Image (tube, helix red, strand yellow):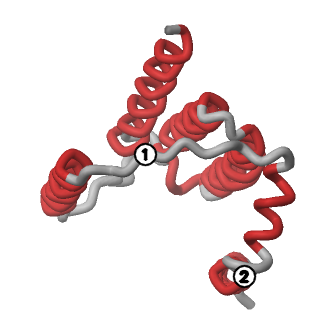
Amino acid sequence: MVPVLIFGLSSVVTLGAALAVVTNKNILHSAFYLILAFVGVASIYVLLEAPFIAVVQVLVYIGAIAILIVFAIMLTRRLLSKDLIQRNAQWGLSALGATGLFLVLGWIVYSVNWPVKLLTVPEDPISVLGQELLSTYVVPFEIASVLLLAALVGAILIGRERE
């Protein structure tokens, strides 16, 4: 009973924080709500008995990406000005598209008969994960690393000072 209550609390916090990310007018506050949403997701990973993924969630998303976003916001003070309009003219179309996507995905989740299997957890899941990443999923793993490298090079080129 307690894990169900913790899951409910974690999911409410995560969804509330995610909603606050997209509805908040202050971009810095949105970044802080994003960190709270990441903490909620990490707590759900803990409930799913995936402590490695929970730690990776905390280290990578909170410790690196979210803090990078906060630093980028703090370094670009122009985005924090009160007179900057932070809404796009097409927000209505975006909301309509997001609602449509939500309805289609909800219909898929409730209409498909999902098979359930009871599997045993391996003794050393981290080594199994490493073996799978470097054997079965080596191509997607390398594509993701090249994509991250390209994003890093692009960020360096955009962020460097112009002469």
Depicted 150 relative to depicted 141: above or below: below
Residue 114 visible (yes or no): yes
Pinpoint residue 122: horizontal percent, then vertical percent.
Answer: 77, 48
Q: Which amino acid type corresponds to the residue marked 2 in the rendered image?
A: Val
Q: Which residue is mark 2?
A: 138
- Residue found 45% across the figure and 28% down from its top: 11
Mark closest to the chain's N terminus, 1 or 2: 1
Q: CA distance from mark 1 to mark 2?
A: 27 Å
Q: Which amino acid type corresponds to the residue marked 1 in the rendered image?
A: Val
Relative placement, left or right, of 19 versus 64 is: left
Relative placement, left or right, of 97 versus 86 is: left
- Residue found 36% across the figure and 45% down from its top: 22
The residue sitting at the top extreme is: 1
- In the image shown, does 56 or 37 lie closer to the viewer? 56
- In the image shown, does 31 or 74 lie closer to the viewer? 31
Numbered disc 1: secondary structure: loop
Q: Which residue is mark 1?
A: 116
